[in-house]
Image: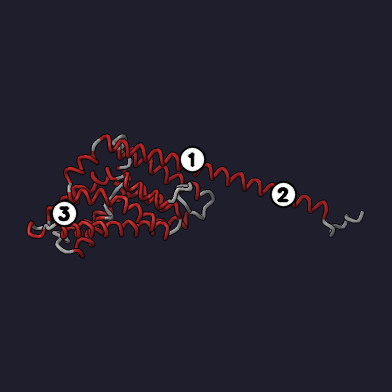
Amino acid sequence: MNPTGLELPPLAAAFVFGLLGGAHCIGMCGGIMSALTFAVPPSMRQPTRLAGLLLGYNLGRITSYMCAGGLIALLGTMIEIAPGARLALQVLAAVMLILMALYIANWWKGLLRLEALGRHLWRHLEPMGRRLMPVVTLPQAVALGAVWGWLPCGLVYSMLAWSLATADPVQGILLMGAFGLGTLPALLATGLVARQVGALIRHPATRTLAALAIIAFALWQLWGVLSMGTMDHDHMNHDHMTHDQMDHGQMEHDPMDGHAGH
């Protein structure tokens, strides 16, 4: 299922959404990236080593996103069995995008309540991450990133709603992978030049533009989903009427009818 309900390739849309969510990523994870960078011993802060560790963190993080996407999409395959569930899941995905945009722009913080649900899991995972620090090797960085990927985040939860709407585990995995790649530029830049890039992306104007772009896309998505739902409903009604007409005609002209010869 295409969660956008449009012709726009869902993986491309997920990647762009990751880019637009960069402002939120900086606020949520920028401090973590900076802390991990400065935790590396000064004697080991060569540019190539730091770049490798930053890539390792993000490889682990995106892998966790993909695992979550596959699991939640598997749940979607069970939910989709219910009548009307497909349309409901797609509408949910669009609404989650709008809520996320309001969050990014600091217009409404209601999505924090959803993040609170993930804190129960994070409470058990955080000690695992602490045991991996300070990070000095690539395997450590990947492992810490994999733990970090489960950090409660409304932006991630919004994309998981898309994965749920796909009702296809492979598509859910790919969708979260594309989204994760979209968030990569902002977080890599934060780790390398935290102050300059972080100030730009966290600027209210940047956050507002990103939020408006996400809202516009979500409304476009809703329009496409609801239009397709209306078309499907009309098509089903047309098919039902056609079958009724065929059955009625067969009753009138069936040569096997005992009254046909009279």
Q: Are marks 3 and 2 in contact (CB under 8 Å)?
A: no
Which of discs 2 and 1 lies nearer the camera? The answer is 1
Looking at the image, the residue that sits furthest to the left is: 43
As drawn, is 118 to the left or to the right of 248? left
Q: Is residue 7 left or right of residue 54?
A: right
Numbered circle sitting on residue 36: 3
Closer to the camera, 146 or 214?
214
Alpha carbons under labels 2 and 1: distance apart = 32 Å
How many residues crowd around disc 2 within 10 Å: few (fewer than 14), some, or many (20 or more)? few
Separation of residues labelled 3 and 2 (CA atoms): 68 Å
Residue 46's spot in the image, x, y percent? 12, 58
**How far is the residue under mark 1 from the one under mark 3?**
43 Å
Question: As shown in the figure, which amino acid type bears the numbered disc 2?
Answer: Asp
- Identify the element where label 3 is drawn: helix
Determine which of the numbered discs, if any, sits on residue 244 in the image.
Answer: 2
Kind of residue at disc 1:
Trp
**Mark 1 sits on what residue?**
223
The first of marks 2 and 1 along the sequence is: 1
Task: Give the SS element for disc 2.
Answer: helix
